Amino acid sequence: MSTNQKLGRRSFLQVGAAAAGGLLIGFYVPGKGQLLAQGPRGGAPAALYPNAFIHIGTDDVVTLTVHKPENGQGTETSIAMLLAEDLECDWKKVRTEFAPINPTFYGGAMQGTFGSQAVRTSWTPMRRTGAAARDMLIQAAATQWGVDKSMCRAENSMVVNLSTNAKLSYGSLADAASKLPVPTNPTLKDSSQFRLLGKPMKRRDAAAKSSGQAVYAMDVKVPGMVYAVVQRSPVIGGKVASFDATKAKAVPGVQQVIQIPEGIAVIAANTYAATEGRKALDVKWNEGVNASLTSTNIREKLMSLTSTPGAVAKTAGTGEASLASAAKKIEVAFEAPYLAHAPMEPYSCVADVRADSAEIWVGTQIPGVANSDAVRTAGLSADKVKLHTLYMGGGFGSRGGGAFISEAVGISKAIGAPVKLMYTREDDLAHGKFRPTSYARMAAGFDDQGWPVAFASNIACSSFAGMQNGVDREGVAGVADTLYSIPNVLVQYHEPGIDIPTNYWRSVGHSQNTFFMEAFIDEMAAAGGKDPVELRRRLLSGPGAARLLGVLNLAADKAGWGKPLPAGRFRGVAVVNCFGSFNAQVAEVSVTAGKLQVHRVVSAVDCGMVVNPAGIVQQQQSAIVYGLSAALRGAITFDKGRVEQTNFHQYEPLRINEMPVVEVHIMPSTEASGGMGEVGTPAIAPAVANAIFAATGKRVRRLPFSSDPLV
């Protein structure tokens, strides 16, 4: 089946599900409305348009149209499980489709997968939708049998008559159910009755992805499509001064060369011709304010800022003043570099912009934002722009919207033809938005028993989450909101004003700040003569810290903390709470002749009520791989305003022979579901750094570990 056929089939299923008879129920994200039922061919009133919907067909197939894109983290599977649990439907008959864009009703950024919110924001709406549909089907069956509703039970896409054991399928009841009012407060199942939630389930997208049937933007082909790449300024923020396209146009297959706001676009009959044409371009650049920017002077600026008072992010007790009266004091500094997202699938987008309409095919974490970017660039009204949400080969915070969508739309609009814009890995590393670099000074004071009585931190980190009272919340996340109980605290922040684009990176501010905080907690333990786990237990004895203490105890127990290890092996520990979840990791390492090997990672996680434990294990493993790759050697550096890393040989991910054994232990919980896509990333770097100290006596205060020798 061709890509066009696959895309057409997907579109047909969405339309057919709404018009082929059966029961259609819309559901809403919190604050967006109430449940709504429509008959087989009814249209939803504009004031009550659903954010997504389920359709139960006369063939028993349940089609879920969901507004949370699949970013590789298992969204389709988890959200479908939430629906199927309270719907009491046959899991094998559930189908999923990505929701179409409707900016008037979907709520912009709410139609997105980011911030580890997909399951958290879908838990109640999806379960209520399933429960409402179940109750309507039961009522339809009771009416047909002439019995009270209480005499019927739903199970496995059937309604059972408890008196006669007669059964009616959901498909046979769907039309009748569609004529009934929707229950306003359907009863949700008790967790003791769950048959899907909390059980390990295979990913719904696994077969399509492993067989090549899943559609990514790179797979899309539309009639008349051409290919484009863009030559962008080698200096961050630079602009085109002039260009000569004569040699580029002479490359076989090159059709046009045009200037766009982001640089020079080369349009060709295929990607190879486009990239060869780009190599032949002669472009002169106005390099701008970053022409002399280097990583060295960035670091010097951050160091200088943190030696002066900053905006206060948190203060408690007597703050920094209490350090002066402490029986003992330590002060150190930590730093973390810029990082790229580097998903395995570089950016790609297909755009077909015409005089009165536009159609876009793209893998995006936030379709609502991506659509807004497309609408703005196309210069059309929102109702004239149609965006198809496709699978993504990783995102990690990088695919909300952004330049690659605007570039594709702008090129198509300029040339009057559909175009597929392609990024190479070199484009991805040099022209993305980066996790910001950060520098943090940390100080602690102790009483005469070696217990911490004061803590101070001064952090410099570029803002990208938004400033409030001079503080960017992500710049201090994990430090200003720590659950450790220390009586006197002062946390300060500086926005350095560096003109390098930054963005959310998997676990955001916690990615660097957990390294700072957890490595420093170990230094506090050593300074006070305490065991690292013992100190953490003491500091997590206060209000609100019980769940973080729980995962610490679980990880320590499963890792055998305090028990002998094989010769040459050493342990380190770190904890984190973020995105509504709690994680503790114990890393087991060896360091031989300066060479680090991470052998084992024991991870304990409390994410509240569990949807799919198999997905939790996968996300923990994935997050640890991602975080350990960055900790070992991940760094984006600059010289004369240019990114020095060009491909994976200089921005190297974890190799298979370096992968530790990862053991994941899930804490049973009845708390509200927390996020899972990011919570596993922050703790791995400090856990390994603390194990390195146990092995060598050397403190690692700068990421990546390859920055300094380990002996």
Image (cartoon, rainbow, N blue to C red):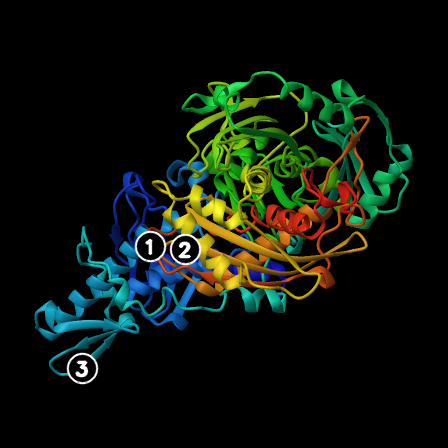
Q: CA distance from mark 1 to mark 2?
A: 11 Å
The residue depicted at 76 percent of the width and 22 percent of the height is 290
Disc 2 packing (10 Å; few <14; some 14–19; many ≥20): many
Name which of mark 2 and mark 3 comes first in the sequence: 2
Residue positioned most to the top: 308
Tell which of 39 and 86 is nearer to you. 86
Q: Position of residue 407 (x, y in %)?
A: 66, 35
Query: In the displayed structure, would residue 159 be above or below residue 299?
Result: below
Q: Residues within 10 Å of mark 3 (few under 14, many from 20)?
A: few
163 on left or right of 547 = left
Is 259 left, or right, of 86 in this rendering? Answer: right
Q: Is residue 346 above or below residue 556?
A: above
Residue 76 visible? yes
In terms of sequence position, does the residue under pointer 3 or pointer 1 come before the other? Answer: 1
Q: Say which quarter of the image contains residue 355.
A: top right
Position of residue 309 relative to residue 558, above or below, is: above
Residue with the mark numbered 3: 166
- Mark 2 — residue? 65
Circle 1 sits on which residue? 126
Residue located at (52% from left, 28% from top): 327
